[in-house]
Amino acid sequence: MRRGCAGRRMMAEPIRIHYTVTGDDFTQAGTASADLKSRLRTMGFPADVIRKVTISLYEGEINLVIHAGGGEIEVTVSGDRIKLVLSDSGPGIEDIELAKREGWSSAPDEIRSLGFGAGMGIPNMIKYSDSFDIQSTPGVGTVVTMEINC
Amino acid sequence: MNTDELAAKCGFRKLTEAPPKEIEGAFAGDLLSWAMSRVSRGDAWFTVMGNLNAVAVAALSDCACIVLCHGSALSQDALERAVREEIVILATEEPVYNAALASGIVNR
């Protein structure tokens, strides 16, 4: 066990946390990430684990706001890992391999002017999570599952 | 150097009255996903993004401060959130490159 992973010792049962993300509401984007960050800190998880979780979840949250018209986030915190499941009923992704590519973005210009749309959302999620899975059906929605180990 | 000392050294205006924070490095850039994954704890972040989402990234990344360059405006909702979360925001008319250069911050 890595030093400082205090969460494992304190936790008899996994903790489940649910967030609902509202679509097109940029004033709320990042709320779930900020809340989870503060909870993980309180639970005693190491800073590098919290950073990975925060980046992964923030990118997912932004995608829910920009592309999906909102969605749901299920977080499961165990002693040795944090699992994030983001699901939406948005338009889905036609070409997932393209969406995973750095620099590729389907964000419209008004979103880009806010500082988004760099095409780093999914690449950042892949980079900062220890396992990443995306399932998407055009017209039905997308489910992203990420795990961060500690 | 802390954020108050940086403001004094470079003539940056303080847009929030948050307690000063120690500066350990710097990042310059405006794309939020780049900033999100590259701003380190304790960085001074030089940018022109003065919106709510930039403040969210600053809070999530635990940066020391945002230095809003080029006379770029800070939106009212961003200011309110920065005050609430005690994010130090400094402002200058200087371009990003000049402001970062003037700070003299050297990354580890």
Image (tube, rainbow, N blue to C red):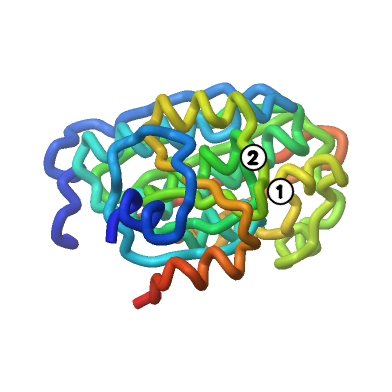
Instruction: Tell me if label 1 and label 2 are in contact, CB under 8 Å.
Output: yes
- Residue visible at 67% across and 46% down? B72
Residue A49's image quarter? Answer: bottom left
Tell me: residue B105, above or below residue A99. below
Q: Tag 2's secondary structure?
A: helix
Quarter holding residue A29: top right
Pointer 2: what residue? A62
Which amino acid does the dot numbered 2 rest on? Ile
- Say which chain tag 1 marks: A
Question: Residue A26, image x and y in percent?
Answer: 67, 30
Residue B95 numbered mark, or none: none
In the rendered structure, the answer to whether residue A51 lies left or right of residue B56 reads left
Q: Quadrant of residue A76?
A: top left
Label 1 is placed on what type of residue?
Phe
Q: Nearer the viewer, mark 1 or mark 2?
A: 1
Q: Is residue A129 visible?
A: no
Q: Which residue is mark 1?
A: A116
Q: Position of residue A137 (x, y in %)?
A: 80, 42
